[in-house]
Amino acid sequence: MPHKDIQNYNAQQSETDQAICDVLATIIDTQLPEAESKLWHGHPVWFLEGNPIVGYSKQKKGLRLMFWSGADFEEPDLNILGGKFKDASIFYNAINDIDIEALKRWLETSKRIQWDYKNIVKRKGRLERLK
């Protein structure tokens, strides 16, 4: 069951986006049972040992699912936007856009490949690989 704040976030979305959010939150909670989830900078985010792993947010292009270390997952469906950080994301505009098997694979990979965002400020913006 997603965190209460996440449930409230999901409930504030349009009907289509709420359905997408609910599916994402349920699958993420199932695949990352050890993760702490909360609203962070106004959006649902899951953390492993204090490090942000995955989250989603409503944007103009649709609902963005972002993996903080996703650039190193070697997954063609995850779009790498920047170059400074290691994030990668995918946008959803309908519940049928969600490839559940791919999502589960990405979540498994997110446990194995992690960059240390928790200490990025302390390191003056420099990322180091945790796993």
Image (spheres, rainbow, N blue to C red):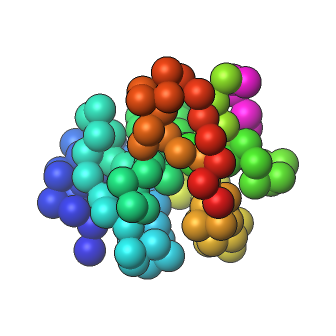
Residue 83 image position (x, y, % from top left): 73, 24
Total marks drawn? 0
Q: Is residue 62 above or below residue 68?
A: above
User: Which of 16/38 is in front?
Assistant: 38
Residue 129 image position (x, y, % from top left): 65, 48
In this picture, which residue range is highlighted in magenta? 79-83
- Is residue 56 among the parts visible in the rendering? no
User: Which of 6/15 is in front?
Assistant: 6
Residue at the location (42% across, 62% down)? Answer: 48
Residue at the location (42% across, 27% down)? Answer: 121
Side (left or right) of 65 relative to 50: right
In which image quadrant can residue 118 be found?
top left
Side (left or right) of 1 relative to 51: left
Residue at the location (44% across, 38% down)? Answer: 119
Q: Is residue 97 above or below residue 85?
A: below
Residue at the location (60% across, 54% down)? Answer: 130
* Quadrant location, the N terminus: bottom left
Instruction: Kindly report the secondary structure that dominates the magenta region of the rendered protein.
Output: loop
- Is residue 77 among the parts visible in the rendering? yes
Side (left or right) of 5 relative to 26: left
Side (left or right) of 65 relative to 69: left
- Residue 15 among those drawn in magenta: no
Residue 131 image position (x, y, % from top left): 65, 60
